[in-house]
Image (cartoon, rainbow, N blue to C red):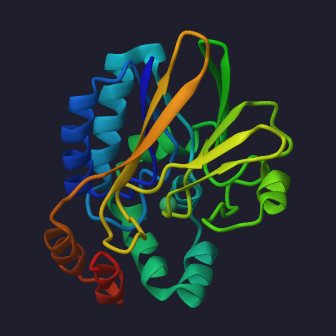
């Protein structure tokens, strides 16, 4: 069983399209999406439409959960915009604009997604989360101590936990025998070269699995220009984050 696991697309059409060119080569039986379809980026409606088309086409072979920024944009208040502007100016101004440009039907879609989901593939129990098992906003970064990661995923009875959120791919094989894989980000990758990252996961008939993080080259300069052209305050700070 071949599964492509994607996360943190963040309204980045160019990254999404190039990653799906790569996914075509894998010919997955299933696709799992770990949330953060929107916030920042430049084309939230395109991404939500493509995800809904995938859901329609793949049926039960497509799984999706909500990310923290899906929740932020779809439940946005003036107070949240203000707080975000104070804490992280470019993100606060982007949030204010993203709420205006994202179609209401797509806001409704991401607002109603589940925060986590458990699926079983050939006997392998897999838990899909955005941040960690205990918190949608928690960071499973590279180079944490095993005990720290264990505390974040301890509530799960799954064999394999798949997460995103930090935009930094990594993996842990814990003493408890759980495996945790952060699949990375398609649309706002925080790796050194800022290129989209996602996961190929293959589960055999006995539930044994192998995985591979895929790095996809794309035109990040073009995306940075798209973001700059949105013209909101501090857009240049956001645009700069796409350049290595
Ligand atoms: Fe994200």
Q: Residue at x 79, y 50 (%)?
A: 134
196 or 188, nearer to the observer:
196
Q: Position of residue 40 (x, y in %)?
A: 38, 68
Residue 166 appears left or right of 140: left
Looking at the image, which is closer to me, 143 or 24?
143
- Percent coordinates x, y for residue 222 in the rendering: 13, 70
Instruction: Please name the residue shown 66% across and 60% down the image.
Output: 140
**Which quarter of the image is occupied by the N terminus?**
top left
Describe residue 22's horizontal placement relative to residue 165 as left or right: left
Residue 240 pos. (x, y %): 30, 84
**Residue drawn at 55 percent across, 27 percent down:** 209
230 lies left or right of 111: left
Q: Quadrant of residue 58?
A: top left
Res 66 quadrant in image: top right
The relative height of residue 38 versus residue 85 in the rendered view (above or below) is: above
Q: Quadrant of the C terminus?
A: bottom left
Q: Exactly how many numbered labels are in the figure? A: 0
Say left or right for 79 vs 147: left
- Residue in the image at 43% along x and 70% along y: 190
Q: Position of residue 123 (x, y in %)?
A: 66, 13
Vertical side of 112 occupied by 37: above or below:
below
The answer to which image quadrant residue 113 occupies is top right
């Amino acid at each position: 069983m071949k599964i492509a696991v994607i996360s943190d697309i963040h309204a980045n059409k160019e990254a999404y399209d190039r990653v799906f060119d790569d996914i075509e080569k894998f010919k997955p039986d299933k696709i799992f999406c770990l949330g953060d379809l929107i916030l920042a980026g430049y084309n939230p409606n395109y991404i939500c439409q493509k995800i809904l088309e995938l859901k329609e086409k793949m049926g039960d072979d497509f799984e999706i959960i909500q990310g923290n920024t899906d929740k932020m944009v779809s439940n946005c208040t003036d107070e949240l915009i203000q707080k975000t502007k104070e804490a992280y100016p470019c993100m606060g101004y982007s949030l204010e604009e993203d709420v205006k440009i994202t179609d209401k039907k797509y806001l409704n879609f991401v607002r109603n997604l589940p925060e986590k989901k458990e699926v079983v593939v050939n006997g392998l129990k897999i838990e899909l989360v955005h941040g960690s098992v205990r918190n949608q906003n928690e960071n499973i970064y590279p180079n944490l101590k095993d005990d720290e990661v264990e505390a974040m995923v301890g509530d799960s009875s799954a064999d394999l936990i798949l997460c995103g959120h930090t935009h930094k791919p990594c993996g842990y094989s814990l003493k408890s025998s759980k495996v945790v894989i952060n699949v990375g980000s398609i649309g706002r990758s925080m790796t050194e070269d800022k290129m989209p990252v996602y996961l190929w996961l293959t589960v055999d008939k006995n539930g044994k699995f192998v995985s591979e993080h895929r790095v996809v080259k794309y035109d990040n300069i073009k995306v940075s220009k798209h973001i700059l052209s949105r013209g909101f305050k501090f857009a240049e700070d956001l645009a700069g984050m796409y350049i290595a």
